[in-house]
Image (spheres, rainbow, N blue to C red):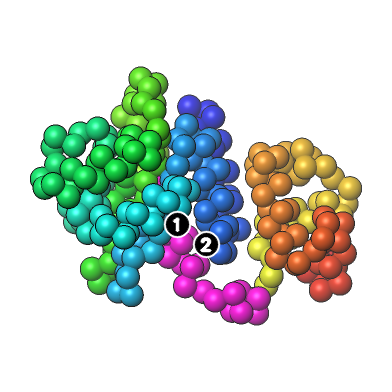
Amino acid sequence: MKDVKRACDEFVDCLHAAQTEDDFRRVAERAAHALGFRWFAYFGQRANGPNLISSYPKSWTTHYFREGYHNIDPVLQGPRIASQVFLWDGREARSAKSAKERRLFDDALSFKIRTGLTVRIPSSQNQFAAFTLAVDERSLGLDRFMETSQDILKTVGLTYHAHVSAKIGTTSAEREIISPLTQRERQCLAWISDGKTMQDIAELLDVTPRGVKFHLDNARRNLAALTLPHAVALAFRQGLLP
């Protein structure tokens, strides 16, 4: 349980630094693996159409939308009155309500998408979102974890949705006007400039070394730096570090 808490804490910490869809994809994929899942998928239904951020194979997501499965997927089409957690198994084609729904189950299995958990998230003005964690193989341990940790996994989905909703709508130009670096990225660069190691910074900030690396990689990319020392130099030159 301690490892689950650490994975969730790192997940939330990294979400604060995420700004782009690619950032959010990497954060959720890392969290999914840390929690024992192979894939994640975030589906947002908005007025201008569906939006998907996921680590599923591209061939599957292309096929999924081309077939219009998002319009009949029982994982998405359940009650939307309140946030709910839905456990599903792709082998349950016999429970399908239509031939197309049965084909959805079969097609998912052909891509080895076997079972998982989806957090359904209703939103305002008939908008809707869902956060999914999925695996290609079932195990007794994973089944037990999904059954006993639904509150934790629900919080993961709701937190992810809140951050995506708040940031994805912001343009890159607007983010640059605010600052090219988040507070956590500046902190990590500042400690690096003081000669601290990633392990040192992890202990100082009470995060994992992996989390520190994530923030430093983001800082280097956001500053268009070639190396970490280059990122520190650019940050000082732009007045981003004390």
Q: 5 or 173: which is nearer to us?
A: 173
- For the record, the magenta segment spans 155-177
Residue 9 visible? The answer is: no
Q: CA distance from mark 1 to mark 2?
A: 7 Å
* Residue 191 drawn at (x, y percent): 81, 51
What kind of element bears circle 2? helix
Q: Is residue 177 left or right of residue 60?
A: right
Residue at 75% in and 60% down: 220
Q: Is residue 166 magenta?
A: yes
Q: Quadrant of residue 50?
A: bottom left
Mark 1: amino acid: Ile
Per the image, the residue denoted by label 1 is 53
Q: Is residue 236 left or right of residue 207?
A: right
* Disc 1 residue crowd, few under 14, some 14–19, many 20+, Cα 10 Å: some
Q: 204 or 120: which is nearer to us?
A: 120
* Residue 127 drawn at (x, y percent): 28, 67
Q: Is residue 2 magenta?
A: no
Q: Quadrant of residue 128?
A: bottom left
Mark 2: amino acid: Glu
Q: 150 or 87: which is nearer to us?
A: 87
What kind of element bears circle 1? strand
Circle on res. 21: 2
Residue at 55% in and 50% down: 27
